[in-house]
Amino acid sequence: MSGDYAGLIKDLLEKTQSRILLVVADGLGGLPMKPGGPTELEAARTPHLDALAPSSSLGLLEPVGPGVTPGSGPAHLALFGYDPVRYNIGRGVLEGLGIDFPLTGRDLAARFNFATMDGRGDLVDRRAGRPSTEENRRLVRKLRDAVQAPPGFELFFETVKEHRGLLVLRGDGLSGAVHDTDPQELGVPALPARALEPAAEKTAEIVNGVVARAVEALRGEKRGNTILLRGFSKHEPLPTMADRYGVDAFAVAQYPMYRGLARLVGMTVAPHTASAAEDLDALGREFGARTFFYLHFKKTDSRGEDGDFAAKVKAVEELDGIIPPLLALKPDVLAVTADHSTPCRLAMHSWHPVPLLIHSPYCRSSAGTRFTERDCAAGALGLRPSTSLMPILLAHARKLLKFGA
């Protein structure tokens, strides 16, 4: 949202007890595996979402802009109504907030993957076979024991989840303007950390030294014998959703980065959950006391990144299965959408718009009979930027006053 429009929305806010529930199925959007075939969402059996479609408003959201493939961070911030270009928060900070790491203004944070390289140094698995979180802890202990902090700095290695970890350098003069070392492809070596501006040259040199020592510490591991760094960043607080939208927001997410995103915008985050049933319990306990709820569903993205069409179809069907208990909470507005598309055909994030369903008593219904990309493309909401979602949800919840005489 532009500054003027964001200010207008803030001026029109009316605090009410109506409740908005936003369900984000990570990477939900897909593609046919062959021309004329169904997308993962079209192939899935989704009776509950399909039953909502005719009486809901359908549309598509564009996370950042035409042709831009977003990361999960900017794509989520856009859904929460924050300009993802202006508020380009690095993944390191998000992971740190997600695991409650006490970040300071002197910290440089980066998310890392444990990865596997062959004898030539070329990457053969960017996620080290998706190890268990307990295996991650073992490898992190190895790094802590063997890799010393550079002189004048502190160094932290932390487990996040599965193959993901957090690296934090603490000291003066560090810069977040450092390029990722993850090349995002296989059969090539990891990239060196590279300064994106002259002031970051020293930081890049320090990072490369830490990575070299980490690789030496992991030598001999069959899986997870290197680390790939992404999202170098320093922590700067954002305006909260309470300030911008007058809502008391609550988040339920199993993966640390999404918990970090929620904390970044001022949401209260539920204690860690490990299953859909626990997610629903956490929502139910808070539902009468707050006015905005964010529920993150990860499996659709993970299976898309694996390129496993059948598994992503199954994940979509699991998502559909939680719709009845969510409706039983009686939200005044229910929205189901995605942060970005992760088609199995690409096995990575893509630039394609994502499907959106909004269900409330004040919907202008669509002609669609199912919740699919094609039905949403023909829906009453049309194609909109993701940053427009929050004002639309506030309006459906009757939280915006009339503008002008």
Image (cartoon, helix red, strand yellow):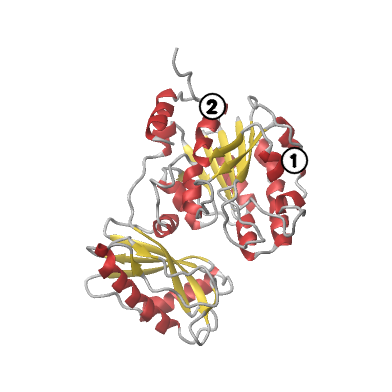
Height in image: 297 above or below 51? below
**Badge 1 density bin: few <14, some 14–19, many ≥20, Cα 10 Å:** many
**Residue 7 seen in this snapshot:** yes
**Residue 269 seen in this snapshot:** no
Q: Residue at x 42, y 44 (%)?
A: 265
Mark 2 — residue? 395
Q: Amino acid at mark 1?
A: Arg
In which quadrant of the rendered view does residue 83 lie?
top left
Q: Residue at x 46, y 25 (%)?
A: 15
Using residue 303 as the reference point, say whether residue 187 is left or right of it. left
Residue 370, which numbered label? 1
Cα–Cα span, label 1 and label 2: 24 Å
Q: The C terminus lies in which quarter of the figure? A: top left
Using residue 104 as the reference point, say whether residue 370 is left or right of it. right
Height in image: 118 above or below 36? below
Q: Residue at x 55, y 44 (%)?
A: 62
Q: Amino acid at mark 2?
A: Ala
Q: Position of residue 384 (x, y in %)?
A: 56, 37
